[in-house]
Image (cartoon, rainbow, N blue to C red):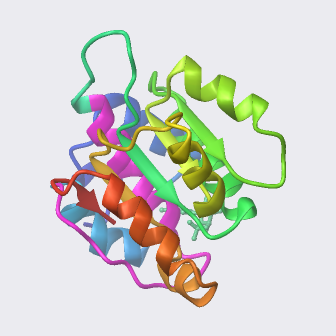
Amino acid sequence: MTSFDDFDFAPSVRQGVRDAGYTTPTPVQAATLPHALKGIDVVGVAQTGTGKTAAFVLPILDYLVKEPSGGKRRPIRALVVTPTRELAIQVEEAIQTYGKATRLRSTTIYGGVGKGGQRTALRNGTDIVVATPGRLLDFVGTNEIDLSHVDVLVLDEADRMLDMGFIRDIRKIVAQAPEQRQTL
Ligand code: AMP
């Protein structure tokens, strides 16, 4: 794929790509998007700054737009786990940029700040959660986050999360998500 026009994105997602000013996929995007957009599990290995964020955010947005959840309640259908708060914020910014033309909602959950604002956002309903492991499990433990409707799970910088000793947390998180899901 040499152009974003070659991908069958939903119109609102195509608009997000256009708004970001992208015309050509980066190598990791060209290699992974065809599979990720089909719902296939993908492991992407590339250095920082090579466009990995869009490589998983665009398939999430495309899936959620094409398969809207019925009813008023918004179950969490996509979860991105990141090793640090900084990375969670970056991913959230990417979702806001690429997802601007969609009507999807995303919420960022991380430690080191009060829980009040995050709790309110969760209560209001969110399609996507971007979270660091510890705070995510806090909210899972109090039943304020239900991962049983997660169709797409992203482990961002999975190697770094393992280096940081998050393996037990990751196992707990993965165990809460349905077995039938896409993992990126
Ligand atoms: P990332 O590796 O995901 O942090 O992305 C690194 C930078 O590349 C970010 O500033 C993105 O906005 C930018 N970027 C990602 N994909 C593309 C693309 N296809 N064309 C141009 N810039 C891109």
Residue bounds of the magenta highlight? 39-65
Residue nearest the observer in this picture, 16 or 182: 182
Q: Quadrant of residue 114?
A: top right
Q: Residue 116 location in percent, x, y?
A: 77, 30
The furthest residue to the front: 142
Q: Please provide percent x and percent y for residue 3.
A: 32, 59
Task: Quarter of the image for the N terminus: give it.
Answer: bottom left
Q: Could you tell me residue 55's position as x and y percent? A: 41, 62
Determine the residue positioned at 76% across, 38% down: 115
* Residue sitting farthest toward the top: 72
Q: Is residue 2 above or below residue 128?
A: below
| Of 71 and 54, the residue lying toward us | 71
Residue displayed at 46% across by 70% down: 170
Name the residue: 39% across, 50% down: 58
Q: How many marks?
A: 0
Q: Is residue 30 left or right of residue 120?
A: left
In the rendered view, tell whether residue 19 sits above or below residue 73: below
Looking at the image, residue 167 lies above or below residue 96:
below
**Residue 69 in which image quadrant:** top left
Q: Is residue 24 visible?
A: no
Q: Residue at x 34, y 53 (%)?
A: 176
Relative to 45, residue 92 above or below: above
